[in-house]
Image (tube, helix red, strand yellow):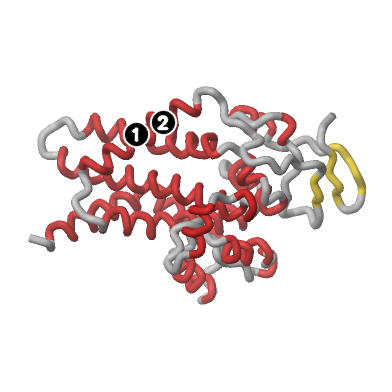
Amino acid sequence: MRPQCTIQGSSIPRPHPNRELWEKLGFEDGSLDCFRDSELSQIRCARIDPGIGSIPARWWQWPLVLVGVCALALQAAAHTSNLFLPAFSLLATDFYTGAIHYTLDHFSPRAFIIGGLVSTFHRHHADPSFVYRVSFVTSASELLVAALLPLMVMGLLAIGPGTKSSMVAIRTALAWKTICLLWCEFSHRMAHVPAKRRPGWVTALQECSIALLLPPAVHARHHFKPLAKGSANNFCQVGLANPFLNGLLACGLRCRWFWLLLTLTLTAFDFVLIAHLESVSVGSQY
């Protein structure tokens, strides 16, 4: 029996508009209850299984994550000479996740190309448990597919003379960006997990003076302030970059097209900038 949704007071069957996409990503039919459509005033979803990882990963995602994380760790460890690169990568990637989050929260699920991603973010507002019900391996595998392909291409381009050192620097920056994206994904996930289910070390990192995981209380302000009134903030997934992003929003910089353009630019070029800054910082030491 398909899940039922209450839409403006009447119970009707509502199939998921992106069913084919969800099935390709490994989601089961039982998880395909409703998500919030920004153009509907009220959607209340039916029964939801609150179990952590209750939407399991597919068999091929586990080896992909294992191989991918090992490859990233080797690339990052072999060519990192100081703490600047990992520290700045975490801060920059946290801001990047905030830009993505703001952009996707403010577009319609019917938007061209990005509609599937938009519906995912809208869904997690209507069903906050969705974030941790999906296997972390599923989310990690999607990030790794997007990162490993350009790493392989840049590895081939770095074979020729004169390009090797610059390509290594860029590959290392991309490796750190992907590692930080995995950490951001885990951080956001833990901010949604109920307190009684979070490991003690996670709670400790959420509550330390410089929180390395997103504190649930900080993230809750993002969920409980209505987007329609333009007052929502705290979009970053670790929270370190929230003061900067919130400051930009407070100054009135809330045009969704600006944030879409910024997100696309950062997606393509931020690791190149990080690689350049890291080379400058290394050069200044000599």
Image-quadrant location for residue 58: top right
Image quadrant containing the C terminus: bottom left
Can see residue 7?
A: yes
Q: Mark number for residue 24?
A: none
Do callouts 1 and 2 mark residues in contact (Cβ within 8 Å)?
yes
Judging depth in this view, the residue of 197 and 260 nearest the camera is 197
Residue at far front of view: 200
Coordinates of residue 111 in the picture (x, y in percent): 62, 47
Judging depth in this view, the residue of 208 and 105 nearest the camera is 208
Instruction: Please report the residue visible at 54 percent of the width from the left and 39 percent of the height from the top.
Output: 136
Coordinates of residue 60 in the picture (x, y in percent): 50, 23
Image-quadrant location for residue 65: top left
Instruction: Please report the residue visible at 59 percent of the width from the left and 60 percent of the height from the top.
Output: 216
Instruction: Characterize the local packing of mark 2: few (<14), some (14-19) or many (20 or more) Cα atoms within 10 angstroms.
Output: few
Residue type at tag 1: Cys
Coordinates of residue 278 in the picture (x, y in percent): 22, 55
Residue at far top of view: 59
Residue type at tag 2: Leu
Disc 1 is placed on an element classified as helix
Instruction: Please report the residue visible at 29 percent of the width from the left and 50 percent of the height from the top.
Output: 272
Coordinates of residue 52 in the picture (x, y in percent): 63, 41
Residue at far left of view: 286
Disc 2 is placed on an element classified as helix
Residue at far bottom of view: 251
Can see residue 99?
A: no
Check disc 2 and report the residue beneath it. 66
Instruction: Please report the residue visible at 48 percent of the width from the left and 71 percent of the height from the top.
Output: 248
**Cα separation between marks 1 and 2:** 6 Å
Instruction: Characterize the local packing of mark 1: few (<14), some (14-19) or many (20 or more) Cα atoms within 10 angstroms.
Output: few
Check disc 1 and report the residue beneath it. 70
- Residue 201 vs 24, above or below: the answer is below
